[in-house]
Image (cartoon, helix red, strand yellow):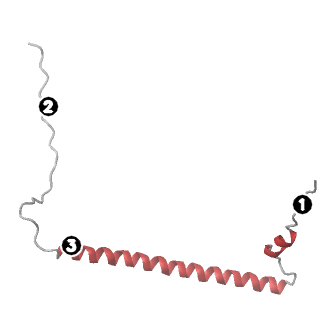
């Protein structure tokens, strides 16, 4: 019986990043990486701010539509309620 061994070294070398030996190229690639990171962070901040502003606008417009919805049903009572506990009777002395 023959066992096949698959050589993954070529595939691994394809995706394994290599650091350049030249120090100037290393610095340039490091700065390029930092620049890409900064662009992504700034873009994320703007996307987050746009989502927050969109949510605030959505809530304001929904509240405005709710106020202008028209007259409510006259058979509906709109009020605030509070639960009142039953008054406690004083303990009897057994007389």
Q: Where is residue 21 in the image (x, y as percent from the top left)?
A: 87, 81
Rendered location of residue 45, percent (x, y): 51, 78
Query: Which is more N-terminal, label 1 or label 2?
Result: 1
Q: Residue 82's mark?
A: none
Quadrant position of the C terminus in the picture: top left
Q: Is residue 49 left or right of residue 60?
A: right
SS assignment at label 3: helix
Check if mark 2's residue and mark 3's residue have beta carbons within 8 Å.
no
Between the residue at mark 2 and the residue at mark 3, the CA separation in whole angstroms equals 43 Å
The vertical placement of 93 against 20, above or below, is above
**79 shown above or below 25:** above
The residue where tag 1 is placed is 4
Q: Which of marks 3 and 1 is in front?
A: 1
**In this picture, is 53 found above or below 75?**
below
Within 10 Å of disc 2 (Cα), the crowding (few <14, some 14-19, many 20+) is: few
Between 84 and 69, the one lying in front of the other is: 69
Residue 88: assigned label:
2
Query: Which residue position holds label 3?
Result: 66
Q: Residue at x 28, y 76 (%)?
A: 60
Could you say whether the residue bearing mark 2 is in a helix, strand or loop? loop
How packed mark 3 is, by other alpha carbons closer than 10 Å (few <14, some 14-19, many 20 or more), is few
Give the x, y percent position of residue 53: 39, 78
């Amino acid at each position: 019986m023959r066992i096949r061994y698959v050589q993954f070294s070529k595939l691994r070398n394809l995706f394994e990043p290599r650091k350049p030996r030249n120090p100037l190229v290393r610095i340039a690639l490091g700065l390029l990486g930092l620049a890409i990171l900064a662009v992504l962070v700034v873009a994320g901040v703007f996307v987050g701010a746009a989502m927050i502003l969109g949510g605030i606008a959505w809530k304001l417009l929904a509240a405005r539509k709710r106020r202008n919805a028209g007259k409510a049903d006259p058979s509906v009572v709109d009020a605030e309620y509070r639960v009142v506990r039953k008054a406690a009777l004083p303990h009897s002395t057994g007389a």
